[in-house]
Image (spheres, rainbow, N blue to C red):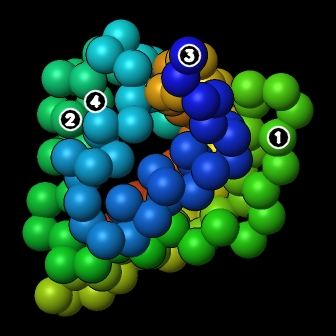
Amino acid sequence: MTERRDPIAIVNDFCAAWTALDIEGALALLADDAVYHNIPVAPVVGKDAIRATIAMFTTGVEQVEFVVRNIAAHGDVVLTERLDIFTFANGRIELPVMGTFEIADGRIIEWRDYFDLQQYMSQIPGANG
């Protein structure tokens, strides 16, 4: 029998992988058919689609930090209050995010992030001047 991993530990490992800019390590914590939904935009399904989505918004990123301010779980659902920081050569984005992660069989099966899309767009380096 395999040992059941704590859902909070899985999500903390996921956030730590982002901070290490280990995108493949973060993706390894997702189920193959996982759903990633940035609530202001359409969801994507499956690791390959998630990888492509992540590649779009991390192009030119030199450093990432997922600062977990609060984390709580109810069964296999983990809630995070985070500050996601993306650093580029010419600026940075600091985005407050509420994240919901659903865990099954030791993997993230659904990842939903709630944030202000306009706040994100207004911080994209080079987009406002």
Residue drawn at the location 77% of the way across and 56% of the way down: 71
Residue ID for mark 3: 1
Residue drawn at the location 31% of the way across and 16% of the way down: 32
Q: Are marks 4 and 2 in contact (CB under 8 Å)?
A: yes
Residue 87 appears in which quarter of the rendering? bottom left
Provide residue 126's location: percent of width, then percent of height: 21, 76
> Label 3 amino acid?
Met
> Label 4 amino acid?
Ile
Q: Quadrant of the C terminus?
A: bottom left
How many angstroms separate mark 3 from mark 4 (CA)? 30 Å
Query: Which-is-in-front pick, marks 1 and 4?
Result: 1
How many angstroms separate mark 2 from mark 3 (CA)? 31 Å
Q: How busy is the neighbourhood of tag 4: few (under 14 within 10 Å), some, or many (20 plus)?
A: many
> Label 2 amino acid?
Arg
Residue ID for mark 1: 73
Query: Which-is-in-front pick, marks 2 and 3?
Result: 3
Residue ID for mark 2: 51
Residue ID for mark 4: 50
Q: Nearer the viewer, residue 99 or 107?
A: 107
Q: Which element type, helix, strand or loop, lies under badge 2?
A: helix
Q: Earlier in the sequence, mark 3 or mark 4?
A: 3
Provide residue 84's location: percent of width, then percent of height: 51, 67
Q: Quadrant of the N terminus?
A: top right
Residue 96 visible here: yes
Q: Earlier in the sequence, mark 2 or mark 3?
A: 3
Q: Which mark is residue 115?
A: none
Q: Are marks 3 and 4 in contact (CB under 8 Å)?
A: no
Q: Nearer the viewer, residue 39 or 26?
A: 26
| For residue 107, side relative to residue 4 (left or right) | left
